[in-house]
Image (spheres, rainbow, N blue to C red):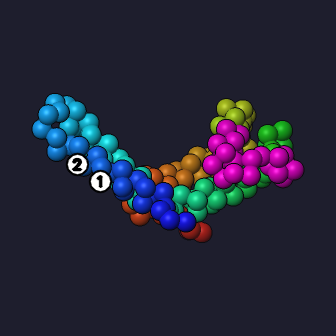
Amino acid sequence: MRPTIAEHLLGIARLLDDVVEDEGLSEASRQALADAVKQTRRLAGGADSRHEFLCWDNEASAEILVTLDVAALRTSTGELDQLADDPVERNVELRGLLAAALRSLPKDERGLESRARIQQHLRHRVDANPALNKQPRYPTEDD
C-alpha cells in the first residue's frame, strides 16, 4: 500500500527540514526540530521491517513462556492463543508476561536459568529491533 509508513515519515521529515531553516525561530526551537527530523528519519528506516521484527519477537517470547523451567510460571499454548491477534498488541502482552515471569521466578538454580534465558532474549531483542539499529541482527544458533 502506498505511501508506506516509511514514506509518510520521510515526508514529515522533509516538511520539518523546511521549518528548521526558518530564521524567525529561536535557536532552541530550530535545534529541537532538527532533533525531531533525525528521530523521524531513524524511525522511517526501521518502519518497513517492524512487522518482521514483531513476529520474530512474539514467537521467541511465546516459546520462552511455554518452556519456562518453573511449572507454576509456565504459560500454556492455550493461554497464548487468547492473546491479541494484532502483532503490536500481542507484543505488549507477551512482554508483560515476560516481565511478570522475571519478577516471580524463584531464586533457586532453575529460576536463575530461566531468568538468564529471558535476559538473553531481551538482549537479542535490542540487537534485532529495527527502530534501534540501522542493520538489525537476529540471533543465530551460535548466540
Marks 1/2 in contact by CB < 8 Å: the verdict is yes
Q: Quick one: 73 or 28, which is closer to the camera?
A: 28
Please give the name of the residue rendered at 77% of the width and 52% of the height, measured from the top-left corner.
67
Which quarter of the picture shows residue 105?
A: top right
Q: What element carries label 1?
A: helix
Is residue 38 visible to the viewer in this orientation of the structure? no
Q: Is mark 2 on a helix, strand or loop?
A: helix
Q: Quadrant of the C terminus?
A: bottom right
60 part of magenta stretch: no
Residue type marked 1: Arg
Which residue is disc 1 drawn over?
14
Mark number for residue 93?
Answer: none
Q: In this view, does 39 lie to the left or right of 139?
A: left
Q: Name the residue under label 2.
A: 18
Query: What segment is highlighted magenta in the picture?
Result: 77-97
**x%, y% of residue 111?**
71, 40
Q: Looking at the picture, does residue 133 appear above or below residue 65? A: below
